[in-house]
Image (tube, grey):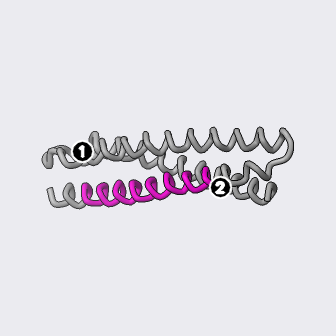
Amino acid sequence: MQSKIMYLSDLKFNIETWKRELRFHFNEMDTFQEKLEEIVPRIEGPIFMKKLEVYQNRIMIEKDAISKLMHRCRNKMANINNADYNENIDGRLQNEQHTLKEDMRTYIKLHYDLKEELMDFYLEVL
């Protein structure tokens, strides 16, 4: 049972860390959206305007993905808080952890790819 408590504590730490990171990324997307709106008057030509629209759409998609991951984190935390301490540790909780962990890893990679592309776009336009 002591190992189960330690395992659940580690899960809680991971989830709380992911939630903080997701909140930061959500706010960061707001900042990037504001910057896109700021540069609209400087954009010349249909190619740059099309790129701007693509990035605005990607920001909306990313914010939606963040919201879904936050919801999954909240559900995971509820499952942990309601866990049966007599349940085998290699059961349901461990399998759920792996999926969220992999999804977070994928999301973070995609987030930083988008961030780099946006930064390059800002340099190109400004």
Disc 1 residue type (three-letter): Ala
Local secondary structure at mark 2: helix
Q: Earlier in the sequence, mark 2 or mark 1?
A: 2
Is residue 14 inside the magenta stretch? Answer: yes
Q: Residue furthest front?
A: 41
Residue drawn where x is 43% and y is 49% of the image: 101
On the rendered structure, is 51 left or right of 93? right
Residue drawn where x is 86% and y is 42% of the image: 45
Local secondary structure at mark 1: helix
Q: Quadrant of the C terminus?
A: bottom right
Q: Whole-percent x and y of residue 119?
A: 70, 58
- Tell which of 26 and 76 is nearer to you: 26
What residue did someone put label 1 on? 78
28 is higher (above) or lower (below) than 90: below
> What separation in Å lies between label 2 and label 1 (alpha carbons)?
37 Å
Disc 2 residue type (three-letter): Lys
Q: Whole-percent x and y of residue 116?
A: 68, 56
Q: Quadrant of the N terminus?
A: bottom left
What residue did someone put label 2 on? 35
Q: Which residues are magenta?
A: 7-34
- Tell which of 29 and 17 is nearer to you: 29
Pointer 1 local density, CA inside 10 Å: few below 14, some 14–19, many at least 20: few
- Tell which of 37 and 23 is nearer to you: 37
Is residue 103 inside the magenta stretch? Answer: no
Residue drawn where x is 80% and y is 49% of the image: 43
Residue drawn where x is 35% and y is 54% of the image: 15
Q: Whole-percent x and y of residue 78?
A: 24, 44
